[in-house]
Amino acid sequence: MTSADTPTLRQSLLAARSAIPDSRRQMLSVQIKQHILDWLQGSHQDCRLPDRTTIGSIAGFWPIREEPDMISLLHDLHTLGHDISLPVIEQRDAPLHFYRWSPDTPLRRGAFNIPEPQVDTPAILPSLILVPTLGYTRDGHRLGYGKGYYDRTLHALAQQGHNAVSVGIGWEEGLIDGSYLPAAHDMQLDAIVTPGGWIVPARNGAD
């Protein structure tokens, strides 16, 4: 699949996601949440998964456009003592910054009308970034909405020497079968979590 085919693929993935009934999306979001919690709490024993012992601060995302809803997960992780942050677009076509969030944090409407924290405290560097994922391959390549914010962000963090664990969050309908040629600037994810479980690229020891 070439880059010229990407808009068609993106529209197909959006249509497949929209076809999931709301009630089912809620149930499936809970399944994704449980996979993440089991991993972070050591209940999911699988040597292929990223090292959970390095995880402290966690960046989540506010769901839009029928994405999995991880807000309940962020509440639970906050209760468990993790520093939680949400992404903020401070400048168009630039890397994201992450600002601390708690259930009591007031939110404003930011770029693309996405709720985000007020920028009144220093940005923080998360050790785990949950990445909203429209489409994905089994080798960890992600297809988003085409704006490139997460690719720029992961690249910028790597350039700073900050190796955050990146975990894509998506539906099983987002799996891209067959050949797919990622763009040169695309950043591979460390893992993807769907309602069906974990997908870990072979570079991390997956089969």
Image: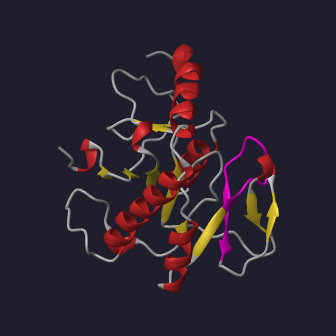
Q: Nearer the viewer, residue 37 or 23?
A: 23
Q: Position of residue 114 (x, y in %)?
A: 74, 54
One can see residue 38 in this view: yes
Residue 162 seen:
no
Q: Give the residue displayed 66% in from the left and 79% down from the top.
A: 103
Q: Nearer the viewer, residue 40 or 21?
A: 21
Q: Residue at x 32, y 60 (%)?
A: 50
Rendering quarter of residue 74: bottom right
Quarter occupied by the C terminus: top left
Give the percent coordinates (x, y) of residue 143.
51, 35
Q: Is residue 196 above or below residue 85?
A: above
Q: Relative to the observer, which residue lies in front, 167 or 161?
A: 167
**Magenta segment includes 19:** no
Residue 44, compared with residue 90, is above or below; it is below
Residue 47 vs residue 10: left or right? left
**Highlighted range, magenta:** 87-101
Does residue 98 show up magenta in the picture? yes
Q: Position of residue 110 (x, y in %)?
A: 80, 55
On the picture, is 100 further left or further right than 89?
Answer: left
Q: Residue at x 73, y 73 (%)?
A: 122
Q: Quadrant of residue 197?
A: bottom left
Quadrant location of the N terminus? top left
- Give the residue drawn at x 50%, y 52%: 25
